[in-house]
């Protein structure tokens, strides 16, 4: 097994991999596998539209703003619609929630079934799409509690309760990264056969790597400790990489190591990234790969969400590098 997990020689698709995992859970109903297959289908459809966005004149602003007060890109809404249409057909889903929709979508209530809630950022980093930057879809799966009346309260579960999390990165290749709580696996889309093929099992993030990833333009408004950390990193031969697309920055860190920071800023005093469908999925992936993720001094996965779209500060990556940041914050 090399540093970032074992390469595989057999041809395993995402579908066969999930079914093999399901067989490890006697009595599994297959509902969960159906959800992953719906996300996989949506990922292939979004990958296709992302690659044709300029040809189809689908770039740029839609002219609307989402609940976050951010201008929506046309592709944000196209990706959101694809995910809704793929996931809406799965009888095992009670609630869907998206970065692009103010309220959760209730598909089934109480005794109508629906064991799971699926939350997603349909297109992360979409502002880089105009310049052909890598963008992604981030998703997380939670158990539904049908005794809780409010859909928002149902999905406001700490990240530790996620039963699966992952992202699909639309870059030079289309990568599908997923964890169901027993390690992180990497699949790559083979467009000729239309399947995500398993390429790495049990990915492990390097323990240390002198690369930090932060939008330094805002550093004057970071709390003092973060500024102290950056001064220390500059004095200790760190290099910097920042794409401005969380999926792309996290994927690089998962493979090469390093640390990503989005501290509190003047315009985002609680941090910019959304806890439920950006920070938590990435935190689960990083912890499962042997890394760390903190929001302030609390492990991200232990933060108790109060609102669907709440934001948190985020420091995640190689454990030695996250600890180096924390040494300057306390
Ligand atoms: P989204 O495109 O879903 O709104 O997410 C953008 C996020 C995240 O992808 C990235 O890490 C961060 O915004 C970049 O923020 P800045 O442009 O403020 O650096
Ligand atoms: Mn995002
Ligand atoms: Mn988004």
Image (cartoon, helix red, strand yellow):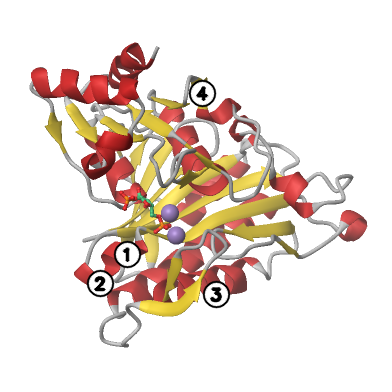
Circle number at residue 130? 2
Report if the beta carbon of the residue with label 2 is closer than 8 angstroms to ligand 1.
no
Q: What secondary structure is found at the residue carrying circle 2?
A: helix
Most foreground residue, 7 or 134: 134
Residue plotted at (35% across, 64% down): 126
Circle number at residue 95? none
Label 1 belongs to which residue?
127
Q: Where's ligand 3: which quadrant?
A: bottom left
- 91 displayed left or right of 232: right
The quarter of the picture where the N terminus appears is: top left
Q: Earlier in the sequence, mark 3 or mark 1?
A: 3
Label 3 belongs to which residue?
81
For mark 4, does the 10 Å Cα neighbourhood hold few (<14), some (14 to 19), or many (20 or more) residues? some
Report if the beta carbon of the residue with label 1 is closer than 8 angstroms to ligand 1.
yes
Q: What secondary structure is found at the residue carrying circle 3?
A: helix
Point out residue 194 in the picture as x, y percentages from the top left corner. 38, 69
């Amino acid at each position: 097994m090399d540093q970032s997990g074992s390469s595989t020689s057999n041809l395993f698709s995402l579908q066969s991999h999930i079914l093999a995992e399901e067989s490890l859970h006697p009595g599994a109903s297959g509902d969960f596998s159906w959800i992953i297959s719906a996300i996989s289908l949506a990922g292939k459809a979004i990958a296709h539209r992302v690659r044709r966005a300029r040809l189809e004149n689908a770039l740029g602003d839609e002219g609307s703003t989402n609940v976050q007060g951010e201008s929506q890109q046309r592709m944000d809404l196209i990706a959101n619609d694809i995910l809704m249409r793929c996931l809406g057909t799965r009888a095992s889903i009670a609630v869907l929630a998206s970065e692009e929709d103010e309220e959760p979508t209730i598909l089934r209530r109480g005794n109508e079934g629906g064991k799971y809630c699926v939350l997603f950022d349909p297109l992360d980093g979409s502002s880089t799409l105009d310049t052909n930057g890598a963008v992604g879809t981030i998703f997380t799966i939670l158990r539904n509690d049908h005794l809780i009346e409010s859909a928002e309260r149902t999905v406001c579960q700490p990240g530790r309760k996620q039963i699966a999390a992952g992202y699909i990165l639309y870059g030079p290749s289309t990568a599908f990264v997923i964890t169901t709580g027993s390690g992180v696996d990497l699949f790559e889309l083979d467009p000729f056969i239309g399947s995500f093929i398993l390429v790495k099992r049990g990915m492990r993030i390097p323990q240390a790597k002198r690369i930090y990833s932060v939008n330094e333009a805002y550093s004057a408004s970071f709390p003092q400790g973060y500024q102290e950390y950056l001064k220390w990193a500059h004095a200790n031969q760190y290099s910097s990489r920042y794409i401005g697309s969380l999926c792309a920055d996290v994927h690089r860190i998962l493979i090469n190591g390093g640390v990503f920071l989005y501290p509190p800023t003047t315009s985002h005093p609680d941090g910019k990234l959304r806890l439920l469908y950006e920070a938590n999925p990435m935190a689960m992936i990083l912890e499962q790969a042997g890394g760390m993720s903190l929001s302030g001094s609390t492990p991200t996965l232990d933060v108790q969400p109060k609102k669907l779209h709440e934001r948190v500060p985020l420091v995640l990556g190689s454990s030695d590098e996250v600890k180096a940041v924390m040494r300057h914050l306390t």
